[in-house]
Amino acid sequence: MAIVRWEPFRELSRIQKELDRLFPRRFFGEIEDEFFAEGAWAPNIDVYETANEVVVNADVPGLDPKEIKIRVEDNTLTIEGEKKVSSEVKEEDYLRIERRYGKFKRVIPLSSLIDRDKIAASFDKGVLEIKMNKKEELKPKEITVEVKEKK
């Protein structure tokens, strides 16, 4: 019988992979279960916050911006859409299909309350950008300390 060196980090890596398979990671939001299935897709997103706004960038190449639904409700941003297979090519003519298609729904919890009257979405080169202004009462306010001199 051969002696095999035990490497604890390899075991931890294996356990992490098994957990990821059972419970897929969803960073900055979740993929709605009704749309999530093996082989389904959802756009990758970046979310960042400045002093005045929350910005979401989503990769949605191949989508018509008119077919993307964006909704802000309570402290949640929802982005929905569908990436469709080209109707110009017959299914039997494909040799390989590696890109993913289908409906998606991203639900992104927001850390700040958003001013619903000041939300703007733009689309450039396959990237959807959503800018949401924070409500005035949430913006940082600088207070000056008044120093009183002793008499």
Image (cartoon, rainbow, N blue to C red):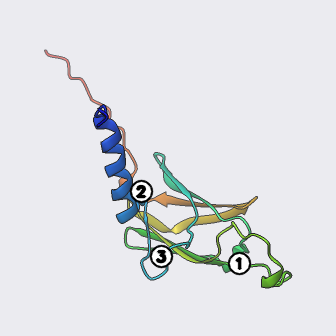
Which sits in the foreground, 38 or 125?
38
Per the model, the C-alpha gap separating discs 1 and 3 is 23 Å
Q: Earlier in the sequence, mark 2 or mark 1?
A: 1
Q: Nearer the viewer, mark 2 or mark 1?
A: 1
Q: Secondary structure at mark 1?
A: helix
Mark seen at residue 39:
none
The percent position of residue 64, horizontal first and vertical second, equals 73, 75
Circle 1 residues within 10 Å: few <14, some 14–19, many ≥20: few
**In this figure, which residue is indicated by the disc labeled 3?**
36
Which quarter of the picture shows residue 128? Answer: bottom right
**In this figure, which residue is indicated by the disc labeled 1?**
66
**In this figure, which residue is indicated by the disc labeled 2?**
136
User: Can you say which quadrant of the picture contains the C terminus?
Assistant: top left
The percent position of residue 32, horizontal first and vertical second, equals 44, 75
Per the model, the C-alpha gap separating discs 2 and 3 is 37 Å
> Can you see residue 132?
yes
Q: Residue furthest right?
A: 88
In this view, 7 is above or below 84: above
Type of residue at label 2?
Glu
User: Can you say which quadrant of the picture contains the N terminus?
Assistant: top left
Asked if the residues shown at circle 2 and circle 3 are in contact, with their CB atoms under 8 angstroms apart, the answer is: no
- In the image, taking residue 33 as reference, residue 87 lies left or right, namely right
The percent position of residue 131, horizontal first and vertical second, equals 57, 59
